[in-house]
Image (tube, helix red, strand yellow):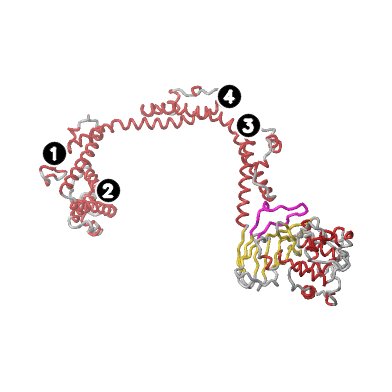
Amino acid sequence: MKGFKKIAILILFVLIISNISIVYGANSAIDDLDIIKQKAFSLGLTDGKTEGAKGDKDTPYYRFLPRNEEIINRFEEEYGLEYDEQYGKDIIESYIQGFEIGYNLEIDRKDNKGDKQKEEKGDYADDLAKTLGELYGYRDFYDGKRSNWNRAIPSNKTIIDMYNLNNETGEFRNSFLNNFREKFKEGYEEGYKKANFEPIKISYEEGIEDGEYFGNILGKIYGVKDYFDGKSLNYKRNLPSDTVIIREYSLNRDSSEYREGFLVGFKREYEKSYNDNYRNMNLEKHKKSYEEGYEHGKTVGTKVGETNAIMDYYLKLDNNWKRQDISSYTIIKENNLMLESEKYRDGFISGYKEGLMEGYTTTFQNLNIDTISEKFIVDTIAISGGEISDSNNNIYLNIEKGTYYNPVVISIDILPDSFFSLTKPYIKGSEFFKIDIKNKSFESDNNKNIELKFEYYGDEKGGIYKLVDNKWFYLPSTIEEGFITTKLKPKSFSKDENIFVVLIDKNATLFYDIRGHWAKDEINTFARRGIVSGYGDGTFKPNKNLSRGEFLSILSKVYDWDTKSMSYDTAKKFKDYNTFKYYKDVINYAVNKNYIQGYSDNTFKPNNPITYKEVETIMKRITDNKNFRWYNTAARILYDKGYRCKSYNSMNNHITRAEVVYMLYLINEWKY
C-alpha cells in the first residue's frame, strides 16, 4: 500500500496548487476538460474512501465501483452540471481512477494503526511540504519575486484545514506543523535555485553538445585534407575564429550561455577530431598495404594447405604442414608479387604461411576424424545368413545360411598403413581390413563358404591376400564386374589374425596352359605364394607327373621345413647322392624325419615319378594321421571338379602336378 501513499500525496498536491474550488453554480457551462476530469477524480476519490471503510484488503475495489450510468448521475448531482456526451468517457475514467486510489488508501489506513500510522502521517507531512515548497519556489522566481520562503508558506490555519488536522491529536498536529515548516523551507529554496540556474545550465550544455557535433565534422575534414596535401599536423591552421563560428552558426540569435557553450565544444572537438583523423590517415597508409597483403596471402595459403593435406592424407603421410612450406622467394614468384609494394609482399608472405599451417592442419585432422568415425563396423548375422559391408562399400562379407548354428557378431576394422610393410613387387589395392567373427558355440559347417569381396577394377595380377605369420598369403581370387572375390572356410576365421588386403603382384606369372583347367585356382594360388613355379616357356604343365624330389620340394615350402637345421647329412648314404643336386637338403630333411625312404638297392632316385601310394604314405607321416587316404582327395576332386584321377585304376599310377597342388591346398587351406 506504500505506492498509494505517494499517489495520494501527488493528488492532494495537484488539488492544492490548482486552486480548485468545490463551489460551482447550477447549470454553469462546461468549457475546461481538465477541470471536469479533476472534479470527476476528486469525486471518485471521496466515494472510494467511503466504500473502502466498508471493505477489507481481500476485497478488490471494483466490487464496490458504481456502474457507468451511476457515475454520470453522481457527477451531475454533486456538481449540478448538465451531462455533455463528449465528456462522458473522460468523467468515467477519471472517476474510476480516483475511486481505486481512495478505496485502497482507506484500506491501507485501516491496516496500519498506532505508531506506524503516526510515522506514515509524518512522512506525508515531509513529502507534501517539500514538494509544495519546491513548486512555490519555482512560482516566485517566475513571478519576479525575491526568494522568501517565509512569505510563501501557508498559515498554520490553512495547513490545518488543508490536511484536516483538527481530527488528529494536539501532539500530532504540533509535530506535523513543525516538520511542515522545515521541509517547506528546504523545498522552496531548492526550487528557487533550480528555476534560476537550471535554464542557464541547460543552455550551456546544449551549446557544448551542438558545438562538439560541428567541430568534429570540420576537424575531420581539415585533418584528412592536410594529410593528403602533405602538410604537417597543425590543427590551428584552419581553425575558425570565434567571430567566424558565431557568424556561421548564427549564435548571436541565441542566449549568451548557449553561445559560450557552443564555442567551447566546437574548438575542443575540432582539435581532437583534426588530430585523430590526421594520424589515422598516416596509420592507414602504412597499415592498409600490410593488412591487405596479409589477408590475401592467408586466403591463398589456406587453400594450398587444404589441398596438400588431402594429398598427404591420401598418400598416408604424417600430419606435417612444414613438408609443404616453401621459401619467401618462391611465394613471391608463384603469386606474381614482384610489382607489389614491400609492405604488401611482407604481409602476403606472413598470411600465406599462417594460412598454409592452419588450412593443412585443420583439413588433415578433419579427414582423420572422419576416417576414424567410419573405420569400425559391427553387425549381427542371423543363422539365415546375410551380408555386411563397410560404410563406403569397399568390402563385403557374405555368409551363407546354415554356416553357423547361432547368430554371430561380425566386426570390420580399417587398420592404418603404418601397421604393415609391403615388399617391392606389391602394390596396395585396398585398405587393410581386420575381420572378426564372434561365434559363441565355436562350431560351424566347414563345408560352407564365406564370400569375401572388394571393389576392384584392376587386371588379373591383383588378388586378395591374408596376413599369416607376418606374411601375405594369396587367396584364390576371381575378378569380375568391378569386384575381386575369394571364398573362405569358417574354420579359417578361428584364429585372431584375420587381416585382408587387395594387392597387385607386378611379378605374378599367369600360366596360359591352366586356363580352363580344373585345378586352375589352386595352381595359381600356390604359384602366387611361391610354392610352385612353371617352366621357362610360361607353362605349368598341370598334367605332367611329379617326381619324388619335386614333391619333397613342394612339401618343404608348404610346411616351412627348416632344412638347414639338420646337422647330420643322412642323404649321403644313398649311392645316387651325386644326382640329388638342389633336392639334396629336402631329401636329407625328409629322410631324417622318416617321411620317406629310399629303395632296397640303397638309391633314392629323386627324378622318378611318385605314385599315389607313395604320396599317401608320406602324407600319413607328415600330417601324423594314420587314417589319411588319398581316396578322400580323389573323391573330392571328382565331386567338386568333375575330374577322375588315375588312382581309381591303380594306386601305383603316378600322381600329376595339379593333383598334388590340389591335395596340399585342400589339406592346408584352413590355415589361411
Mark 2 or 1: in front is: 1
Foreground residue among 141 and 592:
592
Residue highlighted by disc 3 = 343
Q: Identify the amino acid type marked 4.
A: Gly
Tell me if label 2 and label 1 are in contact, CB under 8 Å: no
Inter-mark Cα distance, 1 to 4: 79 Å
Residue highlighted by disc 2 = 33
Q: Secondary structure at mark 1?
A: helix
Query: Residue 630 appears at what percent x and percent y?
Result: 79, 73
Q: Identify the amino acid type marked 3.
A: Lys
Mark 2 or 3: in front is: 3
Query: Residue 134 appears at what percent x and percent y?
Result: 24, 36
Q: Identify the amino acid type marked 2.
A: Leu
Does residue 628 show up magenta in the picture?
A: no
Q: Which mark sits nearer the N-terminus, 1 or 3? A: 1
Residue highlighted by disc 4 = 230
Residue 238 falls left or right of residue 609? left
Query: Residue 138 appears at what percent x and percent y?
Result: 25, 35
Mark 1 or 3: in front is: 3
Q: Identify the amino acid type marked 1.
A: Asn
Q: Which mark sits nearer the N-terminus, 1 or 4? A: 1
Mark 4 or 3: in front is: 3
Q: Secondary structure at mark 3?
A: helix
Inter-mark Cα distance, 1 to 3: 86 Å
Specify start and end residues of the magenta stretch as a single range: 413-434
Q: Which mark is residue 156?
A: 1
Is residue 198 visible to the viewer in this orientation of the structure?
Answer: yes
